[in-house]
Image (cartoon, helix red, strand yellow):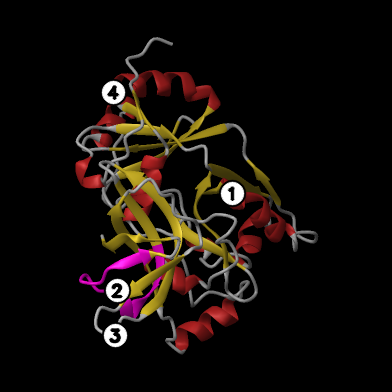
Amino acid sequence: MNSNIVNNTIINLSKNLSYNVFMELKSYSLICVTGIDKTKYLNNQFTIDMNLIDQYKYKIGAHCNINGKVWTSFLIFQYYDCYLYVIQSSVYQKHIHELKKYSLFSQVNIFKEENFRIFGLSGPNGISLLKNFFLKNFSQNRSLIIINKTIILKINKPIDRFLIIVHKSQLFNFLEFMNKNAIFTDSKQWLGLDIESCFPVFNDKISGQFILQSLGLKKWNAIDFNKGCYYGQEMLCKYENKKINQFIVCTLIGKNYLHNPKIFEYINYFDNQTHDIYNVGIVLAWVSIYKNKILLQVRMKKKFLKNKNIFLLSSNPNIKFRIF
């Protein structure tokens, strides 16, 4: 394939994306659910009301254990006579194992869909670029478009960006167009945008560890308190009614001293007045960005979320971070 593709490994903050970039998101998997009981079965497992999903919008949801702790979050939508949803590949096996546990007496099939590739697109003219290729535009009340076996999900945080799921039969034409009109970059650019938007990034260490509200998923409308019973509902409702959530997912920024943070390591706060050190959160995800900076996604105690506070990595107290 002839193209003017430029390989770009620089990861930018969203405010510095002055050109369109696209990337293949190999760290994501696409799950397909079919069968006549698919809606009822998923409604009993997922935190969202599956009856409200239609062909115009995707929904963000979660799959929890009986204690309300999240196995994974996902973006789910209707695709003809099935449901498709996107999750992080690192939690795929654990999630599928738990989801299939109770499917023996239901007519439902749950499997990893291998006939699509997943891409991300972001930049100042991304929506115009897609309109030129697909000859279709997003209306105000629409976040999902399906065209010729290609699925486009519009995400508006931290800036407009698009998750594009391309069937293998459409792949050649799509890549030929994108290579001529956008810069190919590392998939960590998408991770950086997720971290900026405070959308919790799941991996095998995070999966099953934290209750839904403490991961900030409520603000993404990833839970429905009014629908029927589902796994983890009792604990999630109790947690909500007692208003006991002390945590928030936030973004920290600091200088890069060639030290890689560790997922699940502690973030500390040093009190200049008392000289006490407090453990205030844990690292969920991180990415190095241009120039010589690190973005951290942190699950932090709300009371320490103040712009003036300086935070430290437990593995390297010399690296200082502030609220992004």
Q: Is residue 299 visible?
A: yes
Span of residues in magenta: 298-312
Q: Along the polypeptide, which appears first: circle 1 or circle 2?
A: 1
Placement of the N terminus among the 4 image quadrants: top left
Q: Where 125 falls versus 99 (above or below)?
A: above
Q: Nearer the viewer, residue 92 or 220?
A: 92
Q: Along the polypeptide, which appears first: circle 1 or circle 3?
A: 1
Instruction: Choose mark 4 or mark 1, whichever is in front.
Output: 1
Type of the residue with mark 1:
Ser
The residue lying at 44 percent from left, 61 percent from top is 283
In the picture, the disc for residue 274 is 3
Q: CA distance from mark 1 to mark 2?
A: 29 Å
Q: Along the polypeptide, which appears first: circle 2 or circle 3?
A: 3
Q: Along the polypeptide, which appears first: circle 4 or circle 3?
A: 4
Mark 4 — residue? 181
Instruction: Tell me, yes or no, whether the highlighted magenta stretch contains residue 266.
Output: no
Q: Where 304 falls versus 319 (above or below)?
A: below
Q: CA distance from mark 4 to mark 3?
A: 55 Å
The residue lying at 32 percent from left, 39 percent from top is 11
Please rate how many residues cluster around mark 2, counting C-alpha atoms within 10 Å: few if below 14, some from 14 to 19, many from 20. some
Q: Secondary structure at mark 2?
A: loop
Mark 1 — residue? 90
Q: Position of residue 64 (x, y in %)?
A: 59, 67
Mark 2 — residue? 305
Task: Say which quarter of the image contains residue 17.
Answer: top left
Q: CA distance from mark 4 to mark 2?
A: 40 Å
Q: CA distance from mark 2 to mark 3?
A: 18 Å
Q: Position of residue 63 (x, y in %)?
A: 58, 63
Q: Along the polypeptide, which appears first: circle 4 or circle 1?
A: 1
